[in-house]
Image: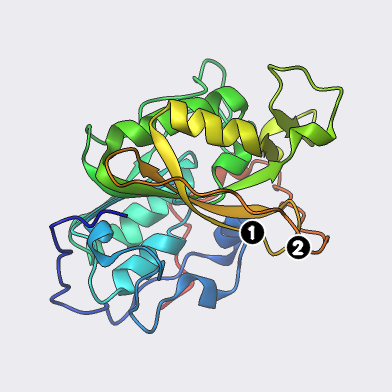
Amino acid sequence: MRRLSFRPQRSTGGVPAELPLPPEHMRRLVGPTDPAAFDNPSGDLVFGDIEPALYESVLDFGCGCGRVARQLIQQRERPRRYVGVDIHAGMIKWCRANLAPRADGFEFVHHDVFAAGLNPGKGKPLTRPLPAADESTTLMIAISVFTHLLEEQAVHYLREARRVLRPGGVLNSTFFLFDKSDFPMMQDFQNALYINHIDPTNAVIFDRTWLRRTAREEGLVVTAASRPEVRGFHWRLVLTREGPGVEEVELPEDATETGIRRPPLLPANAELIGVADEDVADGP
């Protein structure tokens, strides 16, 4: 992977003495509730295999209640620029009030697109442009995001990733993947499996061949791939903006053990969590 010539901004003030932790009911919406999952006490790079220079300008697509943002604030060398984006208005409100004031250059933006469980509403579009200028981002993060996007949404946001990434920039992402050749009844134009007929975005599994091909068509190349801990679950993929010296890797076979990793069930009116003024942090 080609190295970029700039360096991240070194934190001058250190980690705030009391960095708020999102309330448990908000953490439950994004999966892990253990406070340790939101911490980075060592100050090391949050993603150890991502080059330090790539933390210069971060776009966190699906930032939730600030799990990665909080870890990046604790990182010894913080990003010079960080934009957290999420569909859930309450979690964005919490991050704006509790994290943004404690880290220069950090901001949080509500991405107001339709999501049945977390951002319902008639007339909302399925996609919008990401709040970042062309070639403004060195590292885009999308953890547990493409696992909840319809096929047409996934294509749009892969295209957006290519638009916002600088030359040499990367998308650090997770996907549910399957091999379409195991499903002979699927049409050529059908490339995703859905588990929930009421809310298809509950979990979306993409054909691995389709994903690689579509990423290439949108100007992204799979440059690193890690198998999931449980067969068929979260594949971690690093996609790099196409360019000289960027080499594609093959996806390894999914030879991991089978297991259960059910997505969390959303409570009633989940979209309202955190919207009320009384929602506060659990403490440092």
Relative placement, left or right, of 258 versus 179 is right
Residue type at mark 1 is Arg
Q: Which mark is residue 177?
A: none
Q: Which residue is mark 1?
A: 227
Q: Which mark is residue 256?
A: 2
Relative placement, left or right, of 275 versus 75 is right
Query: Between residues 51 and 84, which one lies in front from this camera angle?
Result: 51
Residue 32 falls in which quadrant of the image? Answer: bottom right
Query: Between residues 217 and 155, which one lies in front from this camera angle?
Result: 217
The residue positioned 69% from the left and 64% from the top of the image is 229
Relative placement, left or right, of 252 versus 275 is right
Q: Secondary structure at mark 2?
A: loop
Tell me, yes or no, whether the two marked residues, 2 and 1, touch with CB atoms within 8 Å.
yes
Q: Position of residue 247 (x, y in %)?
A: 40, 47
The residue positioned 48% from the left and 64% from the top of the image is 22
Q: Position of residue 237 (x, y in %)?
A: 52, 51
Screen quadrant of the N terminus: bottom left
The image shows residue 14, relative to residue 232, as above or below, that is: below
Q: Position of residue 87 (x, y in %)?
A: 48, 38
Q: Position of residue 48 (x, y in %)?
A: 40, 71
Residue type at mark 2 is Thr
Residue 199 falls in which quadrant of the image? Answer: top right
Q: Secondary structure at mark 1?
A: loop
The residue positioned 39% from the left and 83% from the top of the image is 41
How far apart in space, not on screen, are marks 2 and 1 (Cα)?
8 Å
